[in-house]
Image (spheres, rainbow, N blue to C red):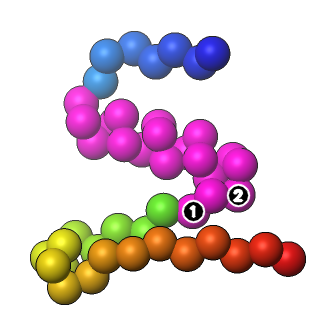
């Protein structure tokens, strides 16, 4: 298990996203779009 030092929420999110992206799971953020306007996920298989 990987342990991280206590960081800001922004650094924590960056670390979390990095771990997922290492597993080919990608996170996309839309900082100026309200969650009611855009929400979802996608699962693709080769």
Q: Relative to 7, does residue 15 appear above or below in the rendering? A: below
- Mark 2 is surrounded, within 10 Å at the Cα level, by few (under 14), some (14 to 19) or many (20 or more) other residues, namely few
Distance between mark 2 and mark 1 Cα atoms: 6 Å
Q: x%, y% of residue 4? A: 46, 18
Q: Position of residue 37 (x, y in %)?
A: 19, 85
Image coordinates of residue 33 in percent, x first then y, are: 18, 80
* Residue 18 located left or right of residue 6: right
Residue under the image location 24 percent in, 30 percent down: 8
Based on the picture, tell me whether residue 20 belongs to the magenta stretch: yes
Q: Are marks 2 and 1 in contact (CB under 8 Å)?
A: yes
Is the residue marked by circle 1 packed among few (<14), some (14-19), or many (20+) residues within 10 Å? Answer: few
Label 2 secondary element: loop
What residue is pinned by disc 2?
24
Q: Residue 36: in sight, yes or no? A: yes
- Label 1 element class: loop
- Where residue 35 sits in the image (x, y, percent)? 19, 73
Label at residue 34: none
- Using residue 34 as the reference point, say whether residue 28 is left or right of it: right
40 over 6 or under it: above or below: below
> Residue 26 — which label?
1
Secondary structure, magenta segment, majority class: helix
Q: Which residues are magenta?
A: 8-26
């Amino acid at each position: 298990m990987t342990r991280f030092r206590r960081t800001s929420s922004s650094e924590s999110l960056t670390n979390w996203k990095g771990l997922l992206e290492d597993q080919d799971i990608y996170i996309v953020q839309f900082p100026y779009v309200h969650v009611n306007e855009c929400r979802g996920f996608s699962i693709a298989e080769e």
